[in-house]
Image (tube, rainbow, N blue to C red):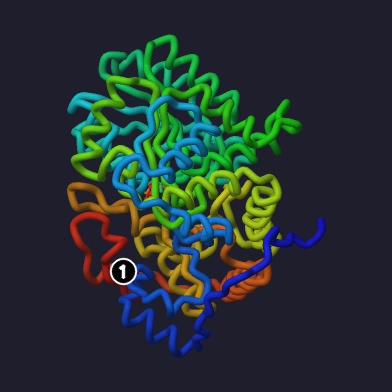
Amino acid sequence: MKTIIEPFRIKSVEPIRMTTAEERDRCIREAHYNLFNLHSDDVLIDLLTDSGTGSMSSRQWGGVMEGNEAYAGSPSFYRFEAAIKNLMPFKYLVPTHQGRAAENILFTVVLKPDSAVPNNTHFDTTRANVESQGADAVDLVIAEGVDPDSGHPFKGNMDIAALEQFIEERGVENIPLCMITVTNNSGGGQPVSMENIRQTREVCDRHGIPLFIDACRFAENAWFIKLREPGYADTSVPDIVREMFSYADGCTMSAKKDALVNMGGWLAMNNEEWAVECRNRLILTEGFATYGGLSGRDLEAIAIGLEEVVDEDYLKYRIASTQYVAEHLAREGVPTVLPAGGHAVYIDARRFAPHIPPLQYPGQSLAVELYRHGGIRGCEIGTAMFGKRPDGSEAPARQDLVRLAIPRRTYTQSQMDYVVEVVQEVFARREQLRGMKFTRQPRALRHFTGHFDYVD
Ligand SMILES: *Cc1c(COP(=O)(O)O)cnc(C)c1O
């Protein structure tokens, strides 16, 4: 295969401050070995998240100047609405400042304390917003989706039999809606097939349950369908996207992902009664119906981003670049989750450093070392994040992973090569990695603010 080249040239640059290993050693100690505590200008390649960290195009920046800031009825809103409806033709649209605001409004309106929401895998804010209504968030991804060795092409698929069974057991009257997340972020950015969306729709139809798509990475998912699902190789990405959404009754969206902007989101649906209530809620918490939590310039940038994200040259580069990192690591023996997802590469830290027991956080130790050795900031997704039970006890998480999330259109191929080299160098002396412990931890979400140190 030829070198992957970025399908853009760079017009404006942001310098990276080079740091020495000694400086980084001091920074990470001062951050109590928690990468969330670092100042980001002490980071060389920041792979903490792909959310809101991408680069806008010159057309989007031009759109920012065109933004119209009228309180009501701004032309920027109508451009935003047209761009969304071109891909996701739902009747009612509610602009929000980011994805979780859309979730909060939707669930406040449609859930009751005894409700349950099935999903392939809830993203953490989605789960938290369901649970804050007193309802249950239930994950029903296929078994292959949680098996790091499975080569299944659509590891984000919903387990259709489990969904049927769940609806029988819980009762239709307690399930106001079903969701499906594309791509499955918490399941490693793995895609969902068109067939699976269609089958989920059939089950929902049979029981009269509305289906909502958590649409954050809809374009990456559509590209995987084009590449991997029989019958779609010659279908255009916008047509694949339209078909995906034709099976749904609504969606929630974080524009910080596949709308190629740094802030924004929306909620869309066909149900008029729900839409009226959601709009009332929007005005209470976000803003008037034609801007929600956004300025006119944000609405313009999103409208343009939605045109750019379904461009096939962009998607080809995007997915190839993620795959490149995962495959080059795997080739050197670094245990990674394969096939690679759309937006991130996951290193299996438990197999990377088998001498560190899960309760000594091998993922945290590896993430710290990637920063110290090469200035790369990834994110532990394992026992430090999920290991603490509500009763205060601790157990190993299902997996100990380090996620390297790739911001959109931000880092070059040579910077990705550098990432591969740094991981390989740490892998070559992996037996030197040491177990860690918490020296301070809050009651909930300890990975964000907790302090770590090495064991003994
Ligand atoms: C990011 C994300 C959200 C939440 O969106 P925010 O804009 O961060 O509030 C919801 N679902 C998925 C799948 C996401 O990736």
Q: In this picture, is 68 found above or below 266?
A: below
- Residue 440 at x, y percent in the picture: 22, 69
**Residue that label 1 marks:** 437
Q: In this picture, is 362 found above or below 445?
A: below
Could you tell me the amino acid type at mark 1?
Lys
Q: Residue at x 32, y 20 (%)?
A: 272
Q: Residue at x 58, y 72 (%)?
A: 12
Instruction: Name the residue at the right extreme.
Output: 1
- Residue 181 at x, y percent in the picture: 46, 36
**Toward the viewer: 27 or 293?**
293
**Could you tell me how many numbered marks the image carries?**
1
- Work out whether residue 307 can be spotted: yes
Secondary element at tag 1:
strand
Q: Residue at x 52, y 60 (%)?
A: 61
> Which quadrant is home to the C terminus?
bottom left
**Toward the viewer: 301 or 112?**
301
Is the C-beta of the residue carrying label 1 under 8 Å from the nearest atom of ligand 1?
Answer: no
- Work out whether residue 152 can be spotted: no
